[in-house]
Image (cartoon, grey):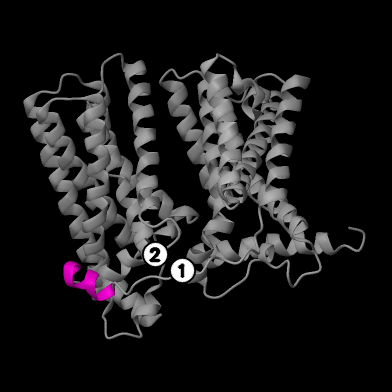
Amino acid sequence: MSDGRARRVFVEMLREEWRLHSRLFRGSHFSLFPVFICLLAGGAAKLLAVTGTEPETVFAGLHALVFVFGLHTGSIGFVGRDALRNLLGDMTLLVFSARTLPLSQNTLLGLFVIKDSVYYAVLFLLPISLGTVLAVIGAVGPLLVAETVSLLWTTLALTFVFGMGTTIAALGLAGRGVPGLALLSAPLVAVGAALASGVDIVSYTPYGLFLAQTPVRAGATVASILIVFLLSAATFDATAPRPTRTVEPAFRRWWRRIGDPVATKSLLDIHRSAGGFGKVLFSAAVLFGVTAALVDFAGQITGVPPSTGISFGAILGLSGFTTYNWLTQSDDVSLYFAHPLSVKAVFAGKFRAFLLLGPLVGLAFYALALVWRGGSVAEAAVGAVLLVGVACYIFGTTVYLTGLSPNEFLFDTALFAVFGAAMVLPLVPILIAGFAISPLSGTLLAALGGFGGVLGAVGVGLYGRSLPKWSNRYQQA
């Protein structure tokens, strides 16, 4: 655009993104996050390399994670508007300003995608690429390292953009009713048919381009990205008004059953937000899938069948973090100051809501794992104890470190490092036992069950110790 309006809006979108993260995650802490994730990515890649994982497997897993990250990023700006509004107050992102800015909706959507691509490619994908390449191939030569980092960064950025475009196109098609849903299912069916017939689809993805830089693979990658964004431009309308929702008054009925007003409000917030309780189940389902992949991967490395009860129980307990995140995402502690409630009462309500939702969701997927993979009764019982213990431990640790703002973990370097260490120290010994020791003796199972109980007690203790700390801090704010 010759008059520079697009460039001006693009710059303001970058500034808007930085301000959003600075306000949510405190700017000084957020600025160190690229350094931390470079070290984290390098450490994880080095650990995989030491355990005998092939470099191609490391790079393939990295592309898969970045694709999921792109899917998630594409949804935040559009689906997560209600949560952002609850956290930051009334606001309008620039991408939703087509009715007031002298730019078309498609131009704003294109600028939004370019802005997110540049922002996350520089702050996230570049340090991840650097850390991974140095860990996998080592400092074999500056030129080779620079070439590999550049190639990996490029294909990861293309993967991220493809994931983001896929989300926007899917949202646009889903909003077009039955014809849109039918069109949305068509590529899924085509991919499934291609996989079933043995077509190497991966070769035509950005990861395939990373493995071999041929014109066919480059053309297929660019074409797939263009298709999803053409679909997005044709079907997605960010300014479309939301359909009016009418809900029956349910607070008193839920309150009588739950017995705590804050817990009732927290659960109602999830129920009435976009996605409802389905997003809690979806988060646990993603963790369930990751656990299944890890169990299979560990079995290939160690050569022994992992314990379904111990491995699934310990990892599914981590779903407690996402559950607490959902319980706190729709409100702010300052909102409660208008009511005759103490800060301790607010935390007590959140704890009760967590106990009603978190362990229940984890145990549901744990039961599914037992039905699918089997296991002895003793291991199943110990795994259930571990799941509840880990869930309470991660809840108490999260409350102690972040209070009612667990999202601060995402980009606060210091908090993320402390939280990571607090999770790794108790979980690594459990996972080693679950992945590498078979069969598990009765003594070891008893020790693991007791350790799960200790973790739960530590979590409840951390929660109790955090109450005076956060009461003082929130009352002084």
Could you give the CA–CA distance between mark 1 and mark 2, rounded to whole angstroms?
10 Å
Question: Is label 1 in a helix, a strand or a loop?
Answer: loop
| Frontmost residue, 42 versus 156 | 156
Numbered disc 2: secondary structure: helix
Query: Residue 4's spot in the image, x, y percent?
Result: 87, 62
Residue 352 lies in the magenta stretch: no
Q: Position of residue 105 (x, y in %)?
A: 74, 60
What amino acid type is highlighted by mark number 2? Arg
In the rendered image, which quarter is residue 71 located in?
Answer: top right
Residue drawn at (20%, 65%) of the image:
464
What segment is highlighted magenta in the picture?
251-258
Please tell me whether mark 1 or mark 2 is closer to you in this view: 1
Q: Is residue 204 above or below residue 338?
A: above
Asked if 246 appears above or below 63 in the picture, the reply is below
Instruction: Tell me if 460 is positioned left or right of 170 in this view.
Output: left
Residue type beneath disc 1: Arg
Question: Whole-percent x and y of residue 134?
Answer: 58, 29
**Residue under pointer 1:** 245
Residue 253 among those drawn in magenta: yes
- Give me the residue at 23% from left, 49% from top: 359
Q: Nearer the viewer, residue 203 or 52?
A: 203
Per the rendering, the mark at residue 410 is none
- The residue singled out by tag 2 in the image is 272
Q: Residues within 10 Å of mark 2 (few under 14, many from 20)?
A: few
In front of the other: 401 or 90 = 90
Question: In percent of the image, x 35 and y 85: which residue is there?
Answer: 338
